[in-house]
Image (cartoon, helix red, strand yellow):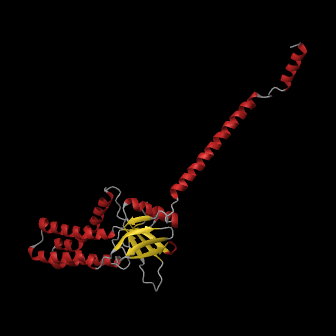
Amino acid sequence: MDDDKREKLREYLRNNRPKNRVNLGNSSNNKENSNKNLENDLNLDNSQISDNKTNFRDYDKEPLIVKNYLKFVNIILIFVYFFLLFLFLIFIGVETRYRSGGIGIGMFTGLSYVLFQPYDKNLTLIIFNNQFIKYQINNEWKKIKISDIKEINKNCSNSYLDLHKIKISNSLLIASIVLFFSTCILVKDYKTAFVIVILPVISYFLARFILFAFINKTIFGYKVFNSVAIYKKQNFLSKDENYINILPNKKNLKEIEIYFVNKLNINLKNQKCYFSVFKKIILKRSLK
């Protein structure tokens, strides 16, 4: 190559040289950052899609089927009560002259809950769909429309239908206290009064605890307020039930909570808790 050609080549390179090498680096960094941002956006979108797939459930194609254990807890209640009554009378004892009366009144107290709450066939399976909650009574399927639901709360009542109700209210509690002290005065024996009034209450909560341990295979996570009552708007002329009450296992309870968050934007954990499905007594403001 002659000198003229070399000189022209040098001049060309001088004129077309990159002005700032730092800019090249910045351009490279910008490109890398842009790629990373794009990748992050894609990952975020994929995560959101994944979350949506997880949270969304078509309850018509994949209905939530919940087993209701309330009838079973009432049966357990009977056995628990008589077992505790037997232990109390045998190992602690009651005065001889009050023994027969204490047993008789105690047995009636234990059976009264069962006598006033007849047992329907079915009502052991509750089916949750997109628009309806279905349940079966005496081999007849009934349903509650989601839009007709008036209220939902948690409670510790063993009553599972509006047709089977013993209203527990402030008046009933006061009457129970009066009955207890009246019994103590009449029989002059606190042991007999305990059998008549206190033992059924202990049996009530113990039966629910036993059932919880049996159906969940654990005693951890037990809560007194683990029944879910669903109230529907009542037509004055309607003969349908005003509510259904469900006692599910832990797994189904979480699924029910998710269902109502998705369908009605109701978080059961923030709802008031009642001793009775009749909501006269608030024992706990929330489950937080």
- For this rendering, which residue is in front, 127 or 91? 127
In this rendering, the count of numbered labels is: 0
Residue that sits furthest to the top in the current view: 2
Residue that sits furthest to the right in the current view: 4
**Would you say residue 272 is visible in this rendering?**
no
Q: Is residue 73 above or below residue 178?
A: above
Quadrant of residue 98 within the rendered picture: bottom left
**Would you say residue 42 is visible in this rendering?**
yes
Q: Is residue 4 above or below residue 110?
A: above
Tell me where residue 165 appears, x and y as whole percent.
34, 78
**Side (left or right) of 169 relative to 269:** left
- For this rendering, which residue is in front, 80 or 284? 80
- For this rendering, which residue is in front, 270 or 140? 140
Quadrant of residue 18 within the rendered picture: top right
Tell me where residue 69 appears, x and y as whole percent.
33, 67
Tell me where residue 184 appears, x and y as whole percent.
19, 76
Write the residue at 48% across / 78% down.
233
Task: Please state, as top left, top right, bottom left or bottom right, where the N terminus lies in the image.
Answer: top right
Tell me where residue 24 appears, x and y as whole percent.
74, 31
**Side (left or right) of 171 relative to 51:** left
Quadrant of residue 157 within the rendered picture: bottom left
Q: Is residue 85 above or below residue 171?
A: above
Residue that sits furthest to the left in the current view: 96
Write the residue at 86% across / 25% down.
15
**Side (left or right) of 61 relative to 221:** right
Residue that sits furthest to the bottom in the current view: 237
Task: Please state, as top left, top right, bottom left or bottom right, where the C terminus lies in the image.
Answer: bottom left
